[in-house]
């Protein structure tokens, strides 16, 4: 029996068959596995630092905001800094807020020292009173409140953003002046949030 001739057409057909049956599925597997590994690595960075305490604050609109409203939602909490750092903090939080502005399951919480209470009437604090809560606390209670969010006492509380999950557990802190850490915060939020939530009615 004569051997079959490997024509250019047959070589192309065989190559295409190999690509469809072997190469593409294998490539897809490596791609998906790489994505899964990345996701697992990112989720492993999230700790359980304990629950946030029961609280009830009055927001910039004079409305009560308490822990019960946070359950079932992510909470991103931070402390408004004094001095020139304040503008950078607000800019960072504005960008973060803009990325999740269409979510109904995310709250932003900014603690405002009493000595800076005038900011509660400024545009940044008024832009989204439903999703971004600004609450006033006495200056001498800042560190005590920071401790309830598991921020170490040797750290400057105003430098850190705290991620709280939908069960009220503190998961991680992020240095708001660090681009890499803030990028990781966005990734962690996206991983913890459900895929689809209706857009808020304006």
Image: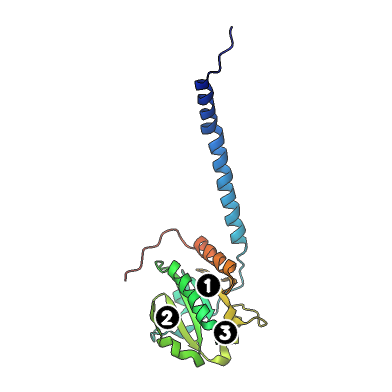
Judged by depth in the image, the label closer to the viewer, 3 or 1, is: 3
> Which residue is at a point 50% across and 62% down the rendered structure image?
190
Q: Which residue is mark 3?
A: 145
Q: Determine whether 83 is above or below 46 in the image.
A: below
Nearest to the eye among marks 2 and 1: give it: 2
Asked whether, in this view, residue 123 is left or right of residue 45, the answer is left
User: What residue is at 49 percent from the left and 90 percent from the top?
Assistant: 116
Q: CA distance from mark 2 to mark 1?
A: 26 Å
Q: Earlier in the sequence, mark 3 or mark 1?
A: 3
Relative depth, front residue between 8 and 17? 8
Q: Residue at x 43, y 77 (%)?
A: 132
Q: Is residue 80 visible?
A: no
- x 38%, y 78%: residue: 127
Residue 168's disc number: 1
Mark-to-mark CA distance, 3 and 1: 15 Å
Other residues around mark 2 within 10 Å, as few (<14) / some (14–19) / many (≥20): some
Q: Which residue is mark 2?
A: 124
| Numbered disc 2: secondary structure | helix
The picture places residue 97, in percent across and down from the top left corner, at 45, 71
Q: Position of residue 42 (x, y in %)?
A: 59, 60
Task: Point out the tag, 3 or 2, that comes first from the N-terminus.
Answer: 2
User: Under tag 3, what secondary structure?
Assistant: helix
Mark 3 Cα shell of 10 Å, populated few (<14), some (14-19), many (≥20) = some
Q: Residues within 10 Å of mark 1 (few under 14, many from 20)?
A: many
- Where does residue 159 sit, x and y in percent of width and height? 59, 79
């Amino acid at each position: 029996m004569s051997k079959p001739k490997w024509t250019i057409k047959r070589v192309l057909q065989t190559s295409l068959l190999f690509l469809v049956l072997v190469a593409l599925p294998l490539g897809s597997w490596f791609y998906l596995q790489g994505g899964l590994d990345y996701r697992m690595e990112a989720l492993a960075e999230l700790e359980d630092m304990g629950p946030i305490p029961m609280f009830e604050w009055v927001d910039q609109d004079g409305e009560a905001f308490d822990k019960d409203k946070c359950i079932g939602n992510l909470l991103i909490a931070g402390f408004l800094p004094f001095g020139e750092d304040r503008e950078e903090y607000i800019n960072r939080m504005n960008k973060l807020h803009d990325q999740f502005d269409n979510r109904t399951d995310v709250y932003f919480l900014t603690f405002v020292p009493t000595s800076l209470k005038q900011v509660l009437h400024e545009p940044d604090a008024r832009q989204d009173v439903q999703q971004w809560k600004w609450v006033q606390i006495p200056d001498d209670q800042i560190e005590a409140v920071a401790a309830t969010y598991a921020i170490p006492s040797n750290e400057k509380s105003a430098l850190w953003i705290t991620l709280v999950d939908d069960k009220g557990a503190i998961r991680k802190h992020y240095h708001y002046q660090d681009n890499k850490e803030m990028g990781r915060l966005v990734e962690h939020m996206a991983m913890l949030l459900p895929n689809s939530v209706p857009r808020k009615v304006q």
